[in-house]
Image (tube, helix red, strand yellow):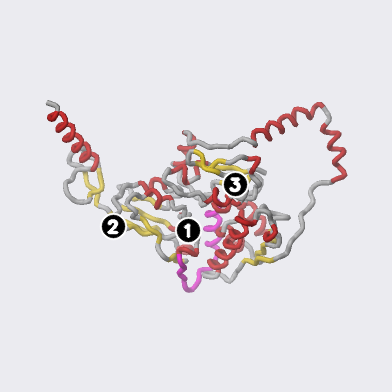
Amino acid sequence: MGLNFDASSCVRTSAIASNCQKCVDICPAQTIKLASNLPSFTPIECIECGGCAGVCPTSSFALSEFNVTDFSFECFNNPQILSCKQNTPCLAVFSSEELISLVLGSDKELVLDIGHCKTCEIKEKLYPLIIANIEEANFILSSFSSKQIKAEDIKLESIQTKNEESNRRDFLHNLKPINAIKHKIEFDEIVNKDELKAFEIDNATISKIKNKKISDRRKLFFALLKQEKKPQRYETIQSNDISFISQKYIDQNCNNCQICYRICPTGALSSSSNFSEIHFDAMLCVKCHLCHDVCTQNAIHIQPSFEIKEFFEPTQRILANFTIKRCDECGNSFTYLGGDTVCPRCHTEEDEAIMLHQIARNNL
């Protein structure tokens, strides 16, 4: 198993103004660090707990041999106890959103074995996260479903996967010359894993960033909600009580600079064809906070409350309207905020021309 990182999905790739460092904060091995504004890590130091995958809002991190979505489908068919000693990495690999999906996809109860958590060597950061995710998932489920997640002190034992009697046979097998090349490759891999794995923004990454996408985590969540019976009455919860989605509003300070919806990684924020409206789809929002980080006018905000109705009747809302006019100077369309019908670019060029003219006159 190993840790994979998709730089094109990371919000820090989209904007240097992003303040997100959830992966850095949660890593119990302290191997995830920021290098050139992007997460980096030393593979051999990674303990493959999956905590970074669980907290990343855009699912940029993933374990190579444990796919949460695939595991979820297995659980739907064969409900079982989730335990770090038998069938999962650390339970922190599951976000609260994924825990909800695990419950919705099965007719059986979901049980998490937290018996080993209190004595675990990496409990300091991950155990509080596991408990918080379970509590959040149950709270949200209670707003529209009778299903709940159970966290029990079961302490399942590890499943032995190696046969000690084969040790000598394996040792003798490895002495064969034909296997020397294989072990040389393994040695080189170990050496490479001991080096810092840094990432950069290349042309391929930039191309991927332009394609707005939602994670499999959200696709599964949305698909399972469609199968749920709509509640007779929709509840409203506080925004602070839900970590993976939000509803937003834009105040009068917005100047339609277009940055927020251009860098939104999932397309939750978008615009009309002529850029006269800013749209928002809550079910596409992953609460990564990137739009807030890049807004120089501090005009975009999270609503104090979230309506559960969005889960069952998602709507694309208009957050802001603007008047679009053509510039008298260059003929290009721009957001008209009053005054002369001249675009900001032409205003800037005119101001620069006046300044240069004054400098030239002063030098005469």
- Verify CB contact (< 8 Å) between mark 1 and mark 3: no
Q: CA distance from mark 3 to mark 2?
A: 42 Å
- Verify CB contact (< 8 Å) between mark 2 and mark 1: no
Residue at left offset 44%, top offset 41%: 210
- Does the stretch in magenta take in 221? yes
Residue at left offset 31%, top offset 47%: 257
Q: Residue furthest front?
A: 363
Dot 3 falls on a residue whose secondary structure is loop
- Residue 30 is labelled as 3
Q: Out of 242 and 141, give the one closest to the viewer.
A: 242
What residue is pinned by disc 2? Answer: 252
Q: CA distance from mark 2 to mark 1?
A: 24 Å
Q: For marks 3 and 2, give the one nearer the viewer.
A: 3
- Does the stretch in magenta take in 63? no
Give the mark nearer the N terminus: 2 vs 1: 1
Tell me which segment is drawn in magenta.
Answer: 216-238
Check disc 3: other Cα within 10 Å, few if <14, some if 14-19, many if 20+.
some
322 displayed left or right of 75: left
